[in-house]
Image (cartoon, grey):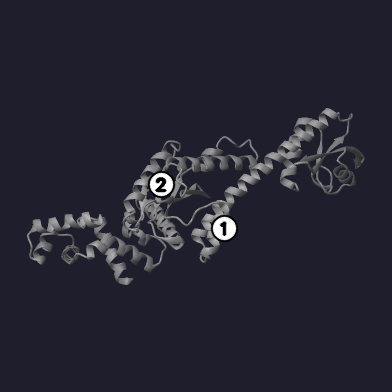
Amino acid sequence: MHINHELAEQIRAKAQTILGRKVIVADSSGQILTGDSPSGLSADALKASQSGNEVIGSSGGAGIHWSPFVYEQETVGVLGVVVERGNVTKEAISLLQGLAEVIVHQYMLIDRIHSTEVMKSSFITSALTSAQINPDEIHRQADILGLNLRSNQAVMLFDLEGFEAEHLANLAHLSREEQRLEIIKATEAIDQLVKSSFDNYQDNIVAYSGSDRFILLKGIGGDNLNTLNTVRFLKKRATYLAETLAKIHTRSPITIGVGQYYPDLGGLRKSYQDAKLALGVGTKVWGSGRVYHIKDVGMYITLANTTTERKAELAHQILNPLMRDTQLFTTVQTFLANNLNLTDAATKLHIHRNTLIYRLDKTKKLIALDPRHFDDALQIKLGLMFQQAG
């Protein structure tokens, strides 16, 4: 292990504060990393590192008491105490060595934890968003990390607004590394909360992607799963997730985007895009603090930056039940063409006004959009337009 400038500065600052003397820190090769002395190689520091013993040297006319410090039984650096007045006691040297070793141990612990979390989050984000992937390689890497991406899963994205700011609000006195550890601890707490709330089901995977956003790969048990028969399950679980998170994240909104289930890794990547669209469009149209399934935002996806083909596919999913019923489809088309006027549309269709109302009620139950409401009517029109374009 080699200490860097950042770690050396942490050691120097704390040692200097405790001892009240100028302190220099060099790495195990004798290279001075921080302190008032000019940077460069110190033969005395190197001698202390190689021998494992204290060395009394000098620099610029001042005496320097060099003492090595270790990590996991290996010398990783050397402390140099500038002796301008009086000798440095053995007790003081032992105290500084112990301090340096504690700081190094903490730094390495943080780095290991951080590396694991960053690796997991980076891997999941890359697997879901990279333009080109090799599924076999993705599964191989997932197996190494202990992540199961072969099961039935859909993606939920949840934003905990103010998550990082809230946890760092009273930590300005800590070093950047210590603050980073606190954020890691907080994300791990969210990870554990989410997993435990779903009975620690092994196919649920949580990752923090930064900027207050978490990714949940939600496992789905059962047989004969498809995109349509999992919608209710995912919406119900997302609502439960919001309620669970609200118990600990009380000061700011919690917004969740839910993607649909599609089989295989390619389907999981598609589900991520669904969740991202649902979260982005839902927040733009209705605001934060709610759960948005991709089908809930309907054809407002026109506000999002996605392909015409994808919009056409979503339009088909939403409107297909209506289009399979020729009578209802003709009724809705006529109603829209007559500017949502019940009397004019009924006359055009040669049916009683109450019959038209019955058919529109049936349409609402079928596709969860009411043609009598302007916003829903607009979504139906947009959906028809994109389906024809697709």
Q: Which residue is mark 1?
A: 141
Asked where in the image residue 49 lies, by quadrant, the reply is top right
The residue at 45%/45% (across/down) is 201
- Above or below for 13 versus 259: above
Numbered mark located on residue 332 in the image: none
Question: Residue 380 at what x, y percent from top left?
Answer: 26, 61
The residue at 29%/64% (across/down) is 383
Amino acid type, callout 2: Thr
**Residue 210 visible in the current orientation:** no
Question: Residue 259 at what x, y percent from top left?
Answer: 39, 55
Depth order, front residue of 162/339: 162
Asked where in the image residue 329 lies, by quadrant, the reply is bottom left
Amino acid type, callout 1: Gln
Question: Residue 303 at what x, y percent from top left?
Answer: 37, 60
The secondary structure type at the circle numbered 2 is: strand
The secondary structure type at the circle numbered 1 is: helix
Question: Residue 125 at what x, y percent from top left?
Answer: 52, 56
**Residue 324 visible in the current orientation:** yes
**In the displayed structure image, the side of residue 172 where residue 255 appears, left or right:** left
Number of the front mark, 2 or 1: 1
Q: How would you rate the neighbour count of disc 1 (Cα within 10 Å): few for under 14, some for 14-19, many for 20 or more?
A: few
Nearer the N terminus, badge 2 or badge 1? 1
Numbered mark located on residue 255 in the image: 2
**Marks 2/1: CA–CA distance:** 30 Å
